Amino acid sequence: MRIKISSMDKRLEKKLSSLRERIRRLDSAVVAFSGGVDSSFLMRICREELGEKAVAVTALSDNYPRSELSVARRVAKIIGVKHVVFDPSKSAIDTRASRSANMIRNSNLYSSMKCVAMRMKLKHVLDGSHQDDADERGRSFLEARRAGVRSPLLESNLSKAEIRLLARELRLPNWDKPPSSSIKPGKAAKAGKDAEKRFEARAYLLALCPRACVRLRGKNAYIIAGKCGMVALARRITSIRKRLKSLGFSEVFLKPAE
């Protein structure tokens, strides 16, 4: 089911319309799906525009924390999309080539993604690269372009901030999830567990009141809802606080929507 977003400016609405049109023209695709906000937002729009002809594909690697995989599985389930997980390192590759090890891994990943798409009879491979990535990712970004991987978010001139805003409007539970690349290796396990708890808390609250706006700030949870939502949540506030306390939140605040 396609969801429309009402509370956005004309410029952002135009970019979203452009994104939807680009994806519709693709007919079918696999999406490189990490479970982060970029790939989740792209996957949600692909699901709305392409239906079952859009599939989420998560590639395992040494740099991809296993705790992220559980989050990716949950997000895929919420979006209602088929989710495929594979390990590109098990694909054959000639390591005697003269390219760098990093480029070899990238080539292996992209070729593996294309093989997955071909086996599923899907036409395109998409990733969640956006405007801010073009300058930051350098060689790996160019390698993806050369391999024919499409980036609809970039093609629609969407920035990271705009993607987060749209993901929040679509009520994706991971809209404010920090990128895994920003987490230091020594803190990865703890960060992964914290991300899972925040994801679970947000999903739980949105299940109770789908139209609510949920904001998680440190140990505090803020739930902003309309009149009917406030009444329904107030009746269950004791159980809500108990559930969120088990997930590491000390305070729960109900605030009426303005």
Image (spheres, rainbow, N blue to C red):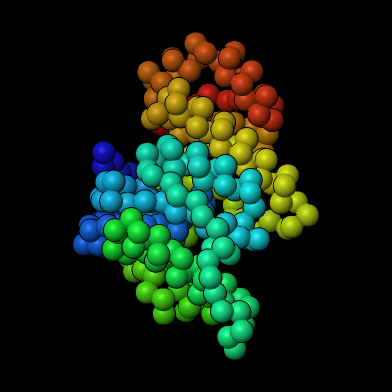
Q: Quadrant of residue 15?
A: bottom left
Residue 74: x, y in percent? 50, 38
Residue lying furthest right in this view? 186
In the depicted view, which residue is nearer to us: 10 or 93? Answer: 93
Asked whether residue 47 is in view, the answer is yes
* Residue, far bottom: 98
Residue at image point 26% right, 38% down: 1
Relative side of 255 to 79, left or right? right
Horizontal side, residue 178 vs residue 116: left or right: right
Q: Quadrant of residue 82?
A: top left
The residue at 23%/58% (across/down) is 27
212, 58: nearer the viewer: 58
Nearer-the-camera pick, 48 or 102 = 102
Q: How many marks?
A: 0
Q: x%, y% of residue 175?
A: 49, 46
The reply to whether residue 134 is visible in this rendering is no
Horizontal and vertical percent for residue 131? 44, 68
What residue is shown at x 44% (from left), y 43% (from top)?
76
Q: Horizontally, is 141 left or right of 22 in the view?
A: right
Q: Residue at x 37, y 64 (%)?
A: 125
| Residue 243 location, quadrant | top right
Quadrant of image for the C terminus? top left
Q: Is residue 92 above or below residue 5?
A: below
252 versus 235 height, above or below: below
